[in-house]
Amino acid sequence: MRDSRCRGHRRGCDASILLDGNNTEKTAAPNLSVRGYEIIDAAKAAVEAICPGVVSCADIIVMATRDAVALSGGGRYIVQTGRRDGTTSLAKNVDLPAPSISVSDSIKAFAKKGLDATDMVYLLGGHTVGVAHCSLFQDRLYNFQNTGKPDPTMDSSLLTALRARCPQNTTVDNTTVTAIANGFDFSTRFGQAMIKLGAVQVLTGKQGEIRLSCRATNNPPNNSFLTSSNYKLQVDTTESFLFKK
Ligand code: HEM
């Protein structure tokens, strides 16, 4: 789902993060923890078996995200389809905001993509699932802005919980932060913001292509180690749980 937020790459929601190869977006440091590519492969194989060359990898990401949100209890929203896949993917184009970004800079970053501050607040609720590494917020737990104290704006019970998961001076850097958003209409508003996010810089009509494999463009460059034979489509319905029933 993290990938599906369409922020893993500067080009927008064109599935460029899925492309394998040297120096593609998935090799950029902030994207190294992105997982689940094989789930997208399985969904693509299932769709290609029934309806070849029609459904883009970009649409599959958006629909898989919708299903992941619903399956994890986050409510269901209706997504738009018709995106096409991009044909380029460069690590140097990845411009993910750092975890230290300020609220005002974050508002500006979302505004550049046509998303307002309200969208931003709901979308950041996407962090109620998934993993965050201690090192990325350790300073706020123990030494906020070199004060030797925690971030005073942090909820004290959250602080206690996170300190237990991320002891000071630990070399273990792996914590799962899971919380439940109790907001009255959070699910609906989150869904609305996700629909907007899924429309950021999409390719439509004759732009881009419908990839045969989500891991390679239909005409990979000669110097790429990828060839289409590396990516023969395999239909494995046992794995395509997103489409069961
Ligand atoms: C200012 C914007 C954002 C910043 C600075 C940010 C920052 C981060 C950071 C630092 C992590 C932890 C990475 C790690 O430890 O490996 C993370 C994870 C995550 N983010 Fe964001 N994020 C932003 C926007 C979003 C949006 C818009 C969504 C979805 C709607 C999202 C969904 C997620 C998810 C699901 C994870 C967990 C990934 C996993 O389990 O591997 N993020 N984000």
Image (cartoon, rainbow, N blue to C red):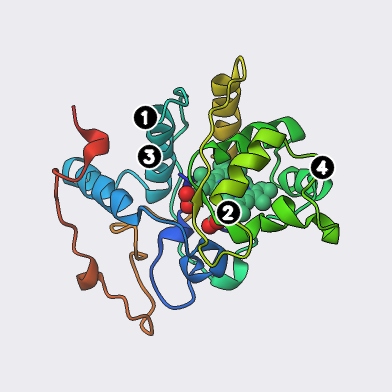
Q: Amino acid at mark 3?
A: Ala
Task: Say which of marks 3 and 1 sits in front.
Answer: 1
Q: Residues within 10 Å of mark 4 (few under 14, many from 20)?
A: few
How far apart are labels 4 and 2 at the CA level?
18 Å
Q: Judging from the image, what secondary structure is the residue with disc 2 in?
A: loop
Question: Which secondary structure, mark 1?
Answer: helix
Marks 4/1: CA–CA distance: 35 Å
Q: Which mark is residue 64?
A: 3
Q: Quadrant of residue 214?
A: bottom left
Residue at image mark 2:
166
Looking at the rendered image, the disc whose residue lies closer to the viewer, 4 or 1, is: 4
* Ligand 1 lies under 8 Å from the Cβ of mark 2: no
Residue drawn at point x = 81 percent, y = 58 percent: 148
Dot in front, 1 or 2: 2
Quadrant of the image for the N terminus? Answer: top left
**Pointer 4 or 1: first along the chain:** 1
Q: Earlier in the sequence, mark 1 or mark 2?
A: 1
Residue under label 4 = 152
